[in-house]
Image (spheres, rainbow, N blue to C red):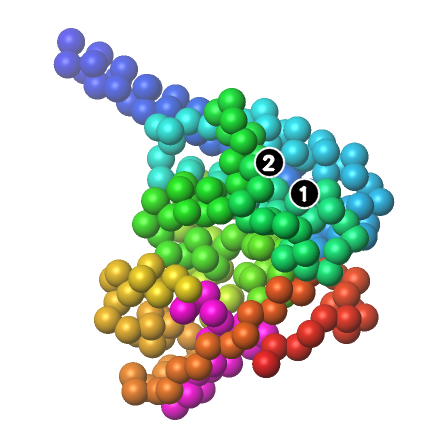
Amino acid sequence: MKKNILLLFLLFSQLSSFSQYINYKFYEDFLNKYVSEDGYVDYDAIHENKDELKAIIKRFKSIETDDKWSKTQKLAHWINTYNVYSIKLIIDHFPINSIKDIHKSFDLQFIPYQKRFISLNYIEKEILSKTLDERIHFAINCASISCPNINREPFYGDIVDEQLEKSAKRFINNMTKNNISRKEVKLSRIFDWFSDDFLKNNTSIIKYINKYSDKKIKENATIEFLDYNWSLNSHKKFIQKEYFALK
């Protein structure tokens, strides 16, 4: 009897895990077509082929979210959702030079969720932040030069921890986002805006960054926060050098 109960429990656990798995291959094909290896988005091409984006959005709408999902599945799905809807927001208002050109861009309620509409800010602050994983700040893309680059590989629940570790290392060591030396660091404003998230398990921002930085920083190094570049992370603007350089 006990053996049968154990088998039923294992079967239920396997079915539960399977039900949480979402294959984002359809999204990966889209990313590989329209996002460069440097993480810049070809908004011009997407705008010319809007039906492809509509098809991707339709697939995301068909995914039934569940509050009982595991933390890793929530992280993967909502990072992917944030990033694809940030692209949609730009295309809906294209052509523009910055997401800031859109009135209340981050508070626009245009993302369907449980019979209502939510915003990008809602996803970030009410869903992703509640996972208590500060690495989300290296994964969600706000369609801007200073934001973390969009990963061409979608996030998946079973490997999201590894993916977030790579995202953290990639962002911190990207010299267009941060400028790091042993005695002086010029950091993305992300580390200023979300300092509480990075300090919850670390005594300083320097200690946190040293976990991922290729260059080890002295604990008493001076810190300066860079101006945030809200110019569109457009592939066309990037190759034509039409964006403003970081200060």
- The label nearer to you, 2 versus 1, is 2
34, above or below 183, in the image: above
One can see residue 188 in this view: yes
Q: Residues within 10 Å of mark 2 (few under 14, many from 20)?
A: some
**Which numbered disc covers residue 66?**
none
- Identify the magenta region: 173-192
| Figure quadrant of the C terminus | bottom right
Residue that badge 1 annotates: 88
Q: Is residue 181 magenta?
A: yes
Are the residues at dot 2 and dot 1 in contact (C-beta closer than 8 Å)?
Answer: yes
Which residue does the image show at 40% across and 82% down from the upper left?
223
Residue 234: x, y in percent?
72, 60
Q: Is residue 119 left or right of residue 86?
A: left
Q: Looking at this rendering, what residue extends furthest in the top direction?
A: 1
Q: Looking at this rendering, what residue extends furthest in the left direction?
A: 2
Quarter of the view holding residue 57: top right
Residue 239: x, y in percent?
78, 69
Q: Circle 1 — which element?
A: helix
Q: Nearer the viewer, residue 42 or 226?
A: 226
Residue 102: x, y in percent?
66, 51
Q: Nearer the viewer, residue 112 or 201?
A: 112
Residue that badge 2 annotates: 110
Residue 25: x, y in percent?
62, 38
Q: Looking at this rendering, what residue extends furthest in the right direction?
A: 48
Q: Looking at this rendering, what residue extends furthest in the bottom direction?
A: 183
Which residue does the image show at 49% across and 39% down from the upper left?
77
Quarter of the view holding residue 75: top left
The CA span between labels 2 and 1 is 10 Å
224, above or below 131, in the image: below
| Callout 2 amino acid | Phe
247, above or below 159, in the image: below
Sequence-first disc among 2 and 1: 1
